[in-house]
Image (cartoon, rainbow, N blue to C red):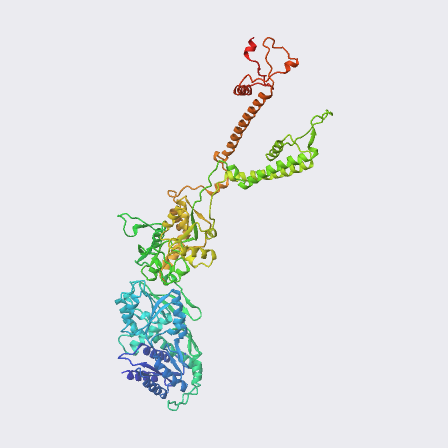
């Protein structure tokens, strides 16, 4: 039937144009069952369109000869030879790579243009299919953009579009490659599902994709967390109705831009040609609601036009002689025609076309993705500009998906806290700073969530020995959760296995320590400005200088003076610097008091001057330092920074187990931090705590420093005035929301976080949970310590003690002086008897002078009482009244 149709078609052409020459072309297609394949229909339509439109070949008509073959290479060679002997000036090869190799070898020997549309690369042929190296690069760029670090590849031998050995070397990821056939699709998909491989690259024959899609549905692998990247360019021809509403990610490239107006017109003409010219009731191009075309058919259409454009440049200068495969005599004009075809630049159904050494190097691939209602374009790839995502919001858009995400977290005040009442269930059990952020983001992005705790209560750290992760990181790597929310730090190690959003909070590592005890106020605090040894040295200097002045004054003749200079007969000289006066002079100079003793000799003046200068410096230093010691609260702080902490052994320190802070010290290359890690690691597990609360409790117990993140430290310090921050930040980092690698939620949540930061919502939430006045303690500002506070009795009370002590000592000394003087007078004073009868009697005789010493008329205590009474009299008398020395009986007689 097909041969009859061809004869009728040729007859019609010959009837229309009888004066034009005929150019024969041959094509090989796989043997079809009953109806023609799409590439064959496109080939026939292209020849028909060229014959109708005389703009390219006005004086020639194309006549096509079609041969059908099976997958038998010997049969393919015979078919090619038959076409060449029939006068075909070009051969259009099939897509089968094995058969194409044999056909190309024959065409190469005879210099017949071999125009192919397959994925294989043959030397000396013209291949309209995009170059293989560019196709590899395009899919590598997509995988890198999607951040696939772990994915699987399904490929069919001799049907794959990718060169897997080059592809796998260019990807830095964990790749699981499986060769499949239609019968093994199900088992391999089940294997990937069990291994939790959610990103799959499918490089199979387009004919078997329908079976693969059914197996995906059977395995229930059509959820939103799965992402399928097809290498086939015919995604729009597949039946994806069952995948549209399950939010599964399906991505692919296409060569034919169905939105182009010229493409739409050609597709309509093909449909009309298929119905009217080929006399078929139902066109193969109208099976879909929208007009579409397979890539092979579009490539076949473009290959015919590429041949015609190349032939236009050299026709009618070439003439085809009788060629046979037996003689192996090449066609004289064949190489010229091949060169002209290789120089063709044109835009066809598959976009811009340009060749280099027979390989197509100019084309445009549209990146398309399945959305809820249709397949949309989200970007494009060209050999010059590579991947360009034109609509990233559409590519990762969650739309209005009614999706419930599994969110894991960890209890950490004030980020995530739990209500333990019986009335709270589900998400209502949790509250805190991160819970508020998650709730706000869920409304912004558009998803529901189930919040639960991570089983092992850890953030996630990598075991250096086994290489295994734990905590929330492990849950995300195994795709057991969609998001991880909490005080989770963004680190390099975590970012290499999971994804993080933009940070919603910036922080660093700092040291939490108990507030150092204030120095106890002592009664003699006024002595603090000078160290105890300085006081000892001053006392020693005082004694030394006093003795030195005494000795030097005795040696210097200038310090000796006559007591009675007018009494020449009795010359008596004295020295003003007695031992007691020397000590008094030195003390008066030190106290900056005047003295009635002045040195006269040069030597004593030198000593006095030096001592005066010494006294000036000591007193000035003491005065300058006294205010600081008495008005500023002094703290006893054993450590000031991390270096102090690392250089001592009395205070132990540690951090949270399996957290980013522990990882920071473990991986740090700074010597101080390396030393701290060695000490903490040697004291494991005492150095590490399972929760922040445990670390804070140990700090409150004393003699322990806890290395923690500054945001949590600020929260703790503001609520416990017994704790404080030591030093500054050891590093800078941020908190982010974690997602599995390649998650479509990351970019959406990042945009929501940036929007919340710009509007100030996150800052308001921070103030709500950190600066709540009902919970914060009243802390004395450190600025107040720098001001001069009023001095209390506890600070300068020692001065009063010294004063009172001095007064008491003076009274005691005066008492002993009075006692000594009283006894001395009792021994030496001569007591005269009273003449009671004549009290005015004067004793003038020598006998009267020889009086005896009698005991005092009154006792010591009576005498002291009289002295005190005289001292307390409010009189201006300069002399005290003379006490009566006569007894009362004598006065009466």
Vertical arrangement, residue 18 with respect to residue 519, above or below: below
Q: Nearer the viewer, residue 358 or 573?
A: 573
Image quadrant for the C terminus? top right
Q: Spot the residue most to the right.
A: 568
Residue at image position (57%, 13%) is 886
x and y, in percent, of residue 7 in the image: 30, 84
In the image: residue 33, left or right of residue 596 = left
Vertical arrangement, residue 805 with respect to residue 128, above or below: above
Q: Is residue 851 visible?
A: yes
x and y, in percent, of residue 27 in the image: 34, 82
Image quadrant for the N terminus? bottom left
In the image: residue 71, left or right of residue 130 = left
- Numbered marks: total: 0
Residue at image position (65%, 38%) is 607
x and y, in percent, of residue 520 in the image: 46, 39
x and y, in percent, of residue 830 in the image: 61, 18
User: What is the quadrant of residue 454 in the picture?
Assistant: bottom left
Q: Is residue 135 visible?
A: no
Q: Nearer the viewer, residue 588 or 624?
A: 588
Q: Spot the residue most to the bottom.
A: 327
Q: Nearer the viewer, residue 541 or 657?
A: 541
Q: Nearer the viewer, residue 491 or 310?
A: 491
């Amino acid at each position: 039937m097909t041969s009859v149709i061809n004869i009728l078609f040729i007859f019609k052409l010959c009837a229309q144009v009888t004066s034009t020459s005929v150019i024969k072309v041959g094509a090989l297609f796989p043997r079809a069952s009953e109806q023609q394949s799409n590439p064959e229909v496109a080939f026939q339509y292209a020849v028909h369109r060229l014959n109708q439109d005389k703009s390219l070949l006005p004086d020639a008509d194309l006549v096509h000869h079609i041969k059908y073959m099976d997958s038998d290479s010997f049969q393919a060679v015979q078919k090619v030879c038959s076409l060449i002997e029939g006068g075909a000036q070009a051969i259009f090869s099939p897509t089968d790579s094995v058969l194409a190799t044999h056909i190309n070898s024959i065409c190469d020997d005879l210099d017949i243009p071999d125009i192919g549309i397959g994925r294989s690369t043959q030397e000396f042929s013209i291949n309209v299919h995009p170059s293989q190296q560019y196709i590899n690069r395009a899919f590598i760029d997509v995988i890198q953009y999607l951040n696939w670090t772990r994915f699987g590849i399904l490929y069919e031998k001799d049907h794959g579009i990718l060169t897997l050995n080059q592809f796998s070397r260019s990807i830095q990821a964990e790749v699981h490659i499986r060769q499949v056939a239609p019968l093994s699709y199900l088992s391999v998909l089940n294997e990937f599902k069990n291994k939790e491989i959610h990103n799959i690259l499918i490089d199979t024959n387009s004919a078997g994709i329908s079976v693969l899609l059914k197996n995906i549905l059977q395995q229930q692998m059509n959820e939103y967390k799965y992402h399928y990247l097809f290498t086939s360019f015919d995604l729009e021809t597949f039946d994806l109705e069952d995948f549209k509403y399950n939010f599964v990610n399906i991505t692919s490239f296409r060569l034919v831009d169905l939105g182009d107006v010229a493409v739409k017109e050609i597709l309509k003409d093909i449909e009309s040609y298929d119905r009217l010219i080929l006399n078929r009731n139902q066109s193969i191009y109208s099976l879909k609601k929208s007009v579409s075309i397979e890539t092979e058919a579009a490539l076949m259409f473009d290959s015919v036009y590429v041949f015609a454009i190349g032939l236009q440049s050299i026709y009618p200068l070439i003439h085809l002689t009788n060629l046979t495969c037996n003689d192996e005599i090449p066609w004289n004009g064949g190489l010229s025609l091949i060169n002209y075809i290789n120089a063709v630049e044109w835009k066809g159904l598959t976009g811009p076309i340009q060749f280099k050494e027979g390989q197509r190097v100019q084309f445009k691939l549209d990146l398309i993705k399945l959305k809820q209602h249709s397949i949309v374009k989200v970007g494009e790839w060209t050999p010059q500009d590579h991947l360009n995502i034109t609509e990233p919001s559409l590519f990762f858009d969650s739309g209005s998906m009614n999706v419930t995400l599994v969110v894991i977290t960890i209890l950490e005040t004030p980020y995530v806290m739990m209500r333990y009442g019986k009335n709270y269930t589900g998400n209502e059990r949790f509250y805190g700073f991160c819970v508020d952020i998650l709730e706000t983001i869920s409304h912004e992005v558009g998803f529901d969530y189930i919040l639960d705790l991570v089983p092992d209560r850890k953030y996630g750290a990598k075991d250096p020995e086994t290489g295994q992760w734990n905590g929330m990181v492990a849950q995300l790597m195994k795709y057991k959760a969609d998001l991880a929310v909490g005080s989770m730090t963004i680190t390099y190690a975590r970012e290499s296995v999971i994804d993080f959003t933009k940070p919603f909070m910036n922080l660093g590592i700092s040291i939490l320590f108990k507030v150092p005890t204030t120095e106890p106020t002592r009664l003699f605090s006024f002595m603090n400005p000078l160290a105890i040894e300085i006081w000892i040295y001053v006392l020693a200097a005082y004694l030394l200088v006093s003795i030195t002045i005494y000795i030097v004054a005795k040696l210097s003749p200038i310090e000796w003076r006559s007591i009675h200079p007018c009494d020449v007969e009795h010359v008596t000289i004295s020295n003003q610097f007695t031992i007691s006066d020397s000590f008094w002079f030195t003390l008066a100079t030190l106290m900056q008091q005047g003295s009635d003793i002045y040195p006269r000799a040069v030597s004593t003046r030198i000593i006095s001057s030096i001592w005066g200068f010494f006294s000036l410096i000591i007193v000035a230093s003491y005065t300058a330092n006294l205010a600081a010691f008495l008005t500023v609260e002094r703290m006893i702080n054993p450590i000031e920074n991390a270096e102090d902490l690392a250089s001592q052994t009395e205070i132990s320190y540690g951090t949270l187990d399996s957290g980013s802070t522990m990882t920071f010290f473990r991986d740090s290359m700074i010597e101080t931090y390396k030393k701290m890690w060695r000490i903490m690691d040697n004291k494991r597990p005492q150095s590490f705590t399972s929760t922040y609360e445990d670390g804070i409790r140990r700090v409150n117990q004393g003699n322990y420093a806890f290395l923690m993140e500054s945001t949590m430290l600020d929260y703790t310090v503001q609520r416990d005035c017994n704790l404080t921050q030591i030093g500054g930040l050891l590093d800078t980092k941020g908190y982010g929301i974690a997602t599995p690698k390649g998650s479509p939620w990351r970019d959406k949540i990042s945009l929501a976080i940036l929007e919340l930061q710009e509007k100030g919502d996150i800052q308001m939430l921070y103030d709500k949970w950190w600066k709540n006045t009902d919970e914060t303690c009243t802390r004395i500002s450190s600025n107040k310590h720098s001001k001069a506070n009023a001095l209390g009795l506890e600070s300068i009370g020692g001065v009063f003690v010294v004063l009172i002590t001095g007064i008491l000592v003076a009274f005691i000394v005066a008492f002993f002086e009075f006692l000594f003087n009283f006894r001395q007078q009792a021994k030496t004073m001569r007591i005269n008897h009273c003449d009671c009868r004549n009290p005015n009697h004067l004793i003038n005789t020598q006998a009267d002078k020889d009086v005896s010493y009698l005991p005092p008329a009154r006792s010591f205590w009576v005498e002291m009482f009289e002295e005190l009474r005289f001292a307390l009299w409010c009189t201006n008398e300069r002399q005290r009244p003379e006490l009566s020395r006569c007894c009362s009986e004598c006065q009466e007689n």
